[in-house]
Image: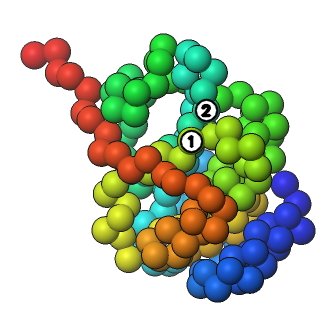
Amino acid sequence: MSIERSDEILQYLKDKSIVVETFEHPPVHTVEESRALRGDIPGIHTKNLFLRDGKKRFFLFVTDEAATVHLKSLAKTIGAKGGLSFGSAEALKELLGIEPGSVSILALYNDANQAVTPVIDVRLRSAERINCHPIINSRTTSLSVTALDAFLAAIGREALFTMPEDPPSNG
C-alpha cells in the first residue's frame, strides 16, 4: 500500500471534519512488532482480523490488541455460516485494497461495494482513543469513538457491535 493512498484517506477524514492524530513509525506487521515500535501512543491499540465464513461472506473484526479471539464463538455471535476462517491475502487486496499487516477499520474506505461487514468489539466503545493503521503499516492513526462513528457514517457503513463470547469450557 502506498503512502499516497494513506495520505488520501487522511485527507478524506480532514475534509469530513473528522479529527484524528497520526503518528509515523517503522512498518509493523504484527501486534508484537507494533508494541515494540510504536512508542507511547495513548489509547487502545486494535487487532483487526479479516475473516470469511463458509458462505464466502467477509467480515472485518476489530478488537483490543490484547483480546483473545475464539473464531468459533465469534462465528456464533455474529451469525456466520459454516464457521469463520481468515480471508486470503488475495481477497484482502481485492476487497479492501490493502496488504496483510495493514488491516484496519479505515480500510473500509476502499470497500466501495460494501462487501466486508465491519464487526467491532463493543468494549472499544468505552475507549478514549482507538488506534489503527491508516491503510499503511508505517503509521498509526488515533481517533475517538465519535470520530470512528463519523467515519463509518461518512462512508455509509454501519458496524455490527458485539461482545464476543468466551468459548464453552470442557469442564
Helix, strand or loop status at disc 1: strand
* Residue under the image location 50 percent in, 23 percent down: 84
Helix, strand or loop status at disc 2: strand
Is 102 situated left or right of 20 in this image?
A: right
Give the alpha-carbon distance from disc 1 to disc 2, as whole Å.
Answer: 6 Å
Quadrant in which residue 163 is drawn: top left
Query: Which mark, by number, is residue 117?
Result: 1
> Is 35 rendered above or below residue 111?
below
Quadrant in which residue 125 is drawn: bottom left
Query: Which mark, by number, is residue 64?
Result: none
> Is 116 rendered above or below residue 158?
above
Q: Quadrant of the N terminus?
A: bottom right
- Disc 2 residue type (three-letter): Phe
- Disc 1 residue type (three-letter): Thr
Q: Contact, CB < 8 Å: mark 1 with mark 2?
A: yes
* Residue under the image location 69 percent in, 65 percent down: 134
Work out whether residue 3 can be spotted. Answer: no
In terms of sequence position, does the residue under pointer 1 or pointer 2 come before the other? Answer: 2
Between residue 51 and residue 140, name the one nearer to us: 51
Is 29 situated left or right of 54 in this image?
A: right
Quadrant in which residue 127 is drawn: bottom left
Q: Residue furthest left?
A: 171
* Residue under the image location 85 percent in, 64 percent down: 5
Query: Which residue in the protein does label 2 denote?
Result: 58
> Is 31 rendered above or below residue 40?
above
- The spot of residue 80 in percent (x, y) is 46, 25
Work out whether residue 130 can be spotted. Answer: yes
